[in-house]
Image (tube, helix red, strand yellow):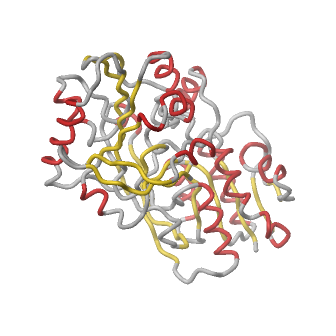
Amino acid sequence: MKLGFIVNPVAGMGGKVGLKGTDGDEVLKKALELGAKPEAPIKAKKALEVLIPVKDKLELYTCPGNMGENIARELGFEPKVLGEIKSSTSAEDTEKAVGEMLDKNIEFLLFAGGDGTARNIYNVVGDKIPVIGIPAGVKIHSGVYASYPRAAGEVTLKFLNEEFVDIKEVEVMDIDEEAFREGQVMAKLYGYMKVPFEPELVQNQKSGGIEGEEAALDGISDKIIENMEPNTFYIIGSGTSTRPIMEKLGLPNTLLGIDIVKNKELIASDVNEKEILECIGDSKAKIIVTVIGGQGYILGRGNQQLSAKVIRKIGKENIQIIATKRKLMDLGRRPLLVDTGDDEVNSMFNGYMKVRTSYTEEVVHMVKGL
């Protein structure tokens, strides 16, 4: 079996530093200046590890250095490396590499990145071969990604073992990052790619809210404000479900970023990981997060500023989840998900947590650390 493996090494680097993506050289430069570290190679390694038992049966094609080769060799694979190593990579490099892999007649492509990477892959692959994405970006709206990194490896293994019968065409979506940084979600459909479909392993496309939820969110925000303790930092997560809290406090809200409130006053807006840690110091702090509709993530998607380091500092017991009952029902029996990139922190969340669903009610829902 000929397998392609490619990593966008800069995907996800803008998350913890609050940049909401890394599309473009200037944004990447700023992310590095803010101390951003590579996230995609770590997640790609988790996926490729799943394939170690069958590595001798694979003809693995990858790219030089941190675009795939380093991880593959570290795990004991003997990949066929295409192209030349570069000090930095671009979208054009990704597309060129995928084209070379297709010329080698790969039968399946495993790639790590975000929605921008998925677009690059689609531009070359189209519907020629099945693919699966390892979620490593800040924004993951496309349906071509596995639910978490290891799941991407499991999907690939199932395909290689011919355990799949259903190949679905799923959406390749991306948003305008400049608009995203201004608090607007402008998603666009670019096309469809083929993905081996397994409901427990492949994520749903991100879904938005629905009419009729406003009353529930109104009650939730009233309760959160009523319970706010004096001299405590409240770190308000991103999303439309947390927006009513800020509106009722009469404070400006960074819809797609993280804000900090203390004594019902705005302390800091659109903060990154470092700024959160510096702001709260050793003071008492709490985190308020919501659920990504259709996917179930509470940490690790769109709020990477709430990193493993931040969570360790604040404590799981000081995290409040809010969501309407409808949003939870839409998940079916699937758990809420946490993927901080730190296995130890992720495992802290395995079990059940309370979710505030209205002014008067909380429910208990299963949470899974990935």
Q: Where 201 falls versus 174 (above or below)?
A: below
Residue at 30%, 44% (x, y): give it: 322
Q: Residue 329 falls in which quadrant of the image?
A: bottom left
* Left or right, residue 227 beside residue 48: left
Residue at 26%, 42% (x, y): give it: 241
Residue 107, horizontal then vertical, whole percent: 68, 72
The residue nearer to you, when weighing 361 against 1, is 361
Residue at 56%, 21% (x, y): give it: 34
Residue 129, horizontal then vertical, whole percent: 60, 71
Q: Residue 132 falls in which quadrant of the image?
A: bottom right
Q: Residue 57 falls in which quadrant of the image?
A: bottom right
The residue nearer to you, when weighing 184 against 15, is 15
Q: Where 67 falls versus 281 (above or below)?
A: below
The residue nearer to you, when weighing 41 against 228, is 228
- The residue at the far bottom in this view is 165
**Quarter of the image containing the N terminus?**
bottom right
Residue 326, horizontal then vertical, whole percent: 24, 59
